[in-house]
């Protein structure tokens, strides 16, 4: 098996972990890393043979990697990803794909012109608790699904200044909801606030209406003095709850549904009563390692990426619509399809 030479551009908290994981994967050599902070470069190369760079163009031209992770600040995603793709280097771009849907479309177009793999780093897709929950929902364990509720809150990250909390954090849960529910977002409503002295919003209370009738609820902020990453999905037979951090999956039973004689026929459940609470055992591999293994496999074997650019763009369009809904106080429909870069990613409608 030919060894693939990997590179990481951007060595913040996420990029440093990409470098670590590439160094642990079979059939992969961490060939080069890049960051404008020499201390980060020194830490990432310490004890490794990887070359360190402060200029990503020099890295691409001199190290000639076989694949690259782009983990620079969001506002630089288009510039860096296009430079790599134009040189024929497959890219995994950390979420969000870009600062705007227009920039995301430009990155996707560059990958298509070059004929190389472009993946988006929606790492929560690879959380084992999420994967198992999706499997069980698809198998009908919840019956009809009513609601998905995500809570992604924590302290303000001073390292992030180029985008607000909606674009930085909400795409995680937008993408997971689309993945788990198998449905697209039809319209959104939102309240956003700016409570810390930056130019972007730091709090979101959002509502997503999916085409299949499920309601998504987003509670996202940088104002909470403890880190919480949770998702619940409610249906007629009960509720699944995921803790993204611990990778735990729980099922809370609706005992009334279990008592329905005709179940699983389509007779209506007549009520809700508290039933068993069950912790579902799942293996707990590191989601980032699973994600990068999938990216490497897609490059090596010519397979479609697990999270293609189209999915990254869909999450971004919903995020942009949420920002606009918070600004206007109106319900907003995310734009479908691949609009040209100058076209807005949403349309306004009367409040719903």
Image (cartoon, rainbow, N blue to C red):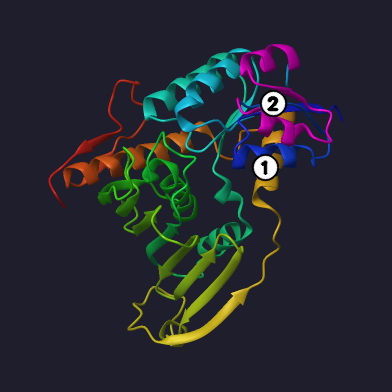
Mark positioned earlier in the residue sequence (1 or 2): 1
Q: Residue at x 22, y 36 (%)?
A: 347
Q: Residue at x 34, y 59 (%)?
A: 217
Q: Quadrant of the N terminus?
A: top right
Q: Is residue 55 magenta?
A: yes
Q: Which residue is mark 1?
A: 17
Q: How many marks?
A: 2
319 in relation to 248, above or below: above
> Which residue is outermost to the left?
350
Query: In the image, which residues are magenta?
Result: 36-63
Q: Is residue 104 magenta?
A: no
Q: Is residue 112 left or right of 41 when viewed as pictured?
A: left
> Which residue is outermost to the right?
1
* Secondary-structure class at tag 2: strand
The residue lying toward the viewer, choosing from 16 and 344, is: 16
The residue lying toward the viewer, choosing from 75 and 4, is: 75
124 in relation to 276, above or below: above
**Whole-percent x, y for residue 337 in the image:** 36, 31
Q: Is residue 150 left or right of 15 when viewed as pictured?
A: left
Q: Residue at x 41, y 60 (%)?
A: 224
**Whole-percent x, y for residue 265 in the image:** 43, 75
Q: Which mark is residue 101?
A: none
Q: Is residue 269 left or right of 239 when viewed as pictured?
A: left
Rate crowding at label 1 as few (under 14), some (14 to 19) or many (20 or more) other CA atoms within 10 Å: some
41 in relation to 88, above or below: below
**Whole-percent x, y for residue 325 in the image:** 23, 44
Could you say which quadrant of the image residue 272 lies in? bottom left
Q: Nearer the viewer, mark 1 or mark 2?
A: 1
* Secondary-structure class at tag 1: helix
**Whole-percent x, y for residue 238 in the image:** 45, 76
Q: Which residue is mark 2?
A: 67
Q: How far apart are the two marked residues, 1 and 2, measured between alpha carbons?
A: 16 Å
């Amino acid at each position: 098996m030919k060894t693939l030479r990997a590179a990481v551009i951007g060595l913040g908290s996420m990029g440093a972990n990409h470098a670590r994981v590439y160094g642990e994967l079979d059939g992969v050599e961490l060939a080069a890393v890049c960051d404008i902070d020499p201390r980060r470069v020194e830490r990432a190369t310490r004890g490794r043979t990887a070359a360190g760079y402060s200029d990503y163009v020099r890295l691409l031209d001199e190290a000639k990697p076989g694949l690259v992770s782009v983990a620079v600040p969001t506002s630089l995603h288009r510039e860096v990803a296009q430079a790599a793709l134009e040189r024929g280097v497959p890219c995994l771009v950390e979420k969000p794909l870009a600062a705007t849907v227009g920039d995301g479309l430009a990155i996707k177009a560059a990958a298509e012109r070059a004929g190389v793999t472009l993946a988006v780093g929606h790492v929560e897709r690879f959380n084992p608790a999420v994967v198992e929950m999706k499997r069980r929902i698809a198998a009908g364990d919840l019956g009809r699904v009513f609601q998905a509720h995500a809570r992604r809150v924590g302290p303000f990250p001073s390292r992030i200044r180029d985008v607000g909390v909606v674009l930085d954090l909400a795409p995680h849960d937008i993408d997971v909801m689309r993945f788990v529910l198998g449905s697209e977002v039809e319209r959104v409503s939102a309240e956003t606030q700016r409570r810390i002295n930056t130019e972007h919003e730091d709090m979101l209370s959002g509502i997503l209406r999916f085409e299949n009738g499920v309601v998504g609820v987003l509670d996202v902020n940088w104002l909470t003095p403890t880190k919480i990453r949770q998702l619940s999905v409610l249906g007629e037979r009960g509720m699944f709850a995921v803790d993204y951090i611990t990778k735990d999956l729980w099922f809370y039973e609706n005992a009334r549904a279990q008592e329905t004689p005709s179940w699983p026929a389509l007779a209506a459940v007549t009520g809700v009563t508290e039933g068993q609470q069950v912790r579902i055992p799942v293996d707990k591999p590191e989601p980032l390692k699973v994600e990068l293994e999938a990216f490497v496999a897609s490059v090596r074997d010519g397979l479609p990426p697990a999270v293609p650019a189209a999915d990254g763009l869909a999450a971004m369009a919903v995020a942009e619509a949420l920002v606009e809904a918070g600004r206007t106080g109106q319900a907003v429909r995310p734009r479908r399809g691949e609009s040209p870069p100058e076209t807005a990613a949403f349309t306004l409608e009367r409040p719903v």
